[in-house]
Image: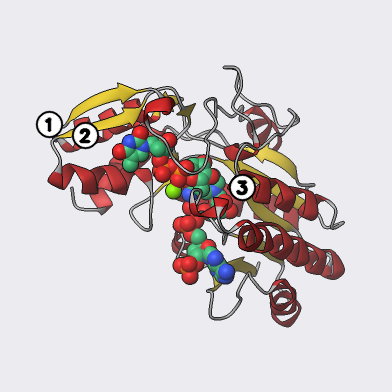
Amino acid sequence: MSILVFGRTGQVARELQRAGMVTALGRAEADLSDPAACAAAIHVARPDCVINAAAYTAVDRAEDEDALARTINAEAPGAMARACADLGIPFLHISTDYVFDGQGEAPWQTDDATAPINAYGRSKLAGEEAVRASGANAAILRTSWVFSAHGANFVKTMLRLSETRDALSVVGDQIGGPTPAAAIAEALLTMAGAMTSGQPGGIYHFAGTPAVSWHDFAAEIFRMVGRDVALTSIPTSDYPTPAQRPLNSRLDCAALATDFGIEPPDWRAGLRAVLKELGI
Ligand SMILES: NC(=O)C1=CN([C@@H]2O[C@H](COP(=O)(O)OP(=O)(O)OC[C@H]3O[C@@H](n4cnc5c(N)ncnc54)[C@H](OP(=O)(O)O)[C@@H]3O)[C@@H](O)[C@H]2O)C=CC1
Ligand SMILES: Cc1cn([C@H]2C[C@H](O)[C@@H](COP(=O)(O)OP(=O)(O)O[C@H]3O[C@@H](C)C(=O)[C@@H](O)[C@H]3O)O2)c(=O)[nH]c1=O
Ligand SMILES: [Mg+2]
């Protein structure tokens, strides 16, 4: 099975290249700010399946770059999905917990109403809609709080800050599931195999378990690495950022287990593996 991946340097893109026999297109080969070029790349490659692992992921910056975020996160995936529909091949796309408004405490179901509260989330929701409208056999995998040894993520931010600071304040009222990029790659490859054999896609959730606050995630990072950082749990109101973030990011992952046999990963095992890879 030949799999074409958009994205080469990103967290999930790297893990896809490590886990499977895939052809990865970096920004130089396919720039998502040019949706037609992405569609053309699919027609040239004629793969059995396409996975989009590239996205505009700078949540705060998106507030000022709404149009660019929309082109990359919505128009480009839409064009990719339509190319896959033309070729009759499956398309797998990654979305986010940030399509929800974060109200309540119940884990979000795949068919719960979406209502993004920031520009990144709105661009990702528009991407979901473009993919669903394409007519392709498409899967949209919503995940959250992605971390790996590479790229920019909360684990690496905490480790970096702890080198120069012995006290940190981290929000304790945003709750979600940290998700290892390697587990997302594995899930996508399993889904790609099943969909290439005819299984229908749909919207699915996939996040690490158990759900925690960013503060408790940070505490576990420092506990595992044995760094003595004085951590204070603060409310979101004490950590102002350009983009508003949802308080409740819990994702109900049951459908993916039922339909594809993929269970949510324990993020603590994933964290241990990432710290080992970082040599800590
Ligand atoms: N990170 C997270 O916490 C979460 C991510 N997601 C979703 O998961 C998916 C993968 O995210 P993740 O691996 O963390 O992403 P990263 O932020 O690690 O990487 C983003 C990737 O997209 C590429 N990219 C960005 N802009 C363009 C462009 N114009 N043309 C071509 N490539 C581009 C980047 O390339 P370059 O290096 O050249 O910039 C990079 O390879 C995305 O769909 C994201 O929305 C969902 C939930 C949480
Ligand atoms: C650095 C730092 C962050 N924070 C807070 C800010 C924020 O609420 C939370 C996490 O910070 P980040 O900048 O990593 O969060 P963010 O980049 O918004 O992470 C999101 O990225 C996008 C792409 C997604 O799709 C989401 O699932 C989610 O992973 O921690 C603190 O409270 N103290 C700190 O010292
Ligand atoms: Mg970020």
Question: In terms of depth relative to the viewer, which is nearer, 192 or 118?
Answer: 118
138 relative position to 181: left or right = right
Q: Nearer the viewer, mark 3 or mark 1?
A: 3
* Mark 1 surroundings within 10 Å by alpha-carbon count, few (fewer than 14), some (14 through 19), many (20 or more): few
Question: In terms of depth relative to the viewer, which is nearer, 37 or 140?
Answer: 37
The x, y position of residue 53, in whole percent, is 57, 59
The x, y position of residue 148, in whole percent, is 38, 50
At x 63%, y 30%, the residue is 101
**Amino acid type indicated by mark 2:** Phe
The residue to which callout 1 is attached is 228
Q: Given contact means CB atoms under 8 Å apart, are the residues at marks 1 and 2 in contact? A: yes
| Vertical comparison of 70 with 231: above or below | below
Which secondary structure lies at badge 3?
A: helix
Which secondary structure lies at badge 2?
A: helix
| Dot 3 beta carbon under 8 Å from ligand 2 | no
Give the CA separation, mark 1 to mark 2. Answer: 7 Å
Q: Is residue 183 visible in this depiction of the protein? A: no
Which secondary structure lies at badge 1?
A: loop
Question: In terms of depth relative to the viewer, which is nearer, 202 or 213?
Answer: 213
Q: Is residue 192 visible in this depiction of the protein? A: yes
| Vertical comparison of 204 with 70: above or below | above
280 relative position to 186: left or right = left
Q: Nearer the viewer, mark 2 or mark 3?
A: 3
At x 77%, y 66%, the residue is 79
Label ID, residue 119? 3
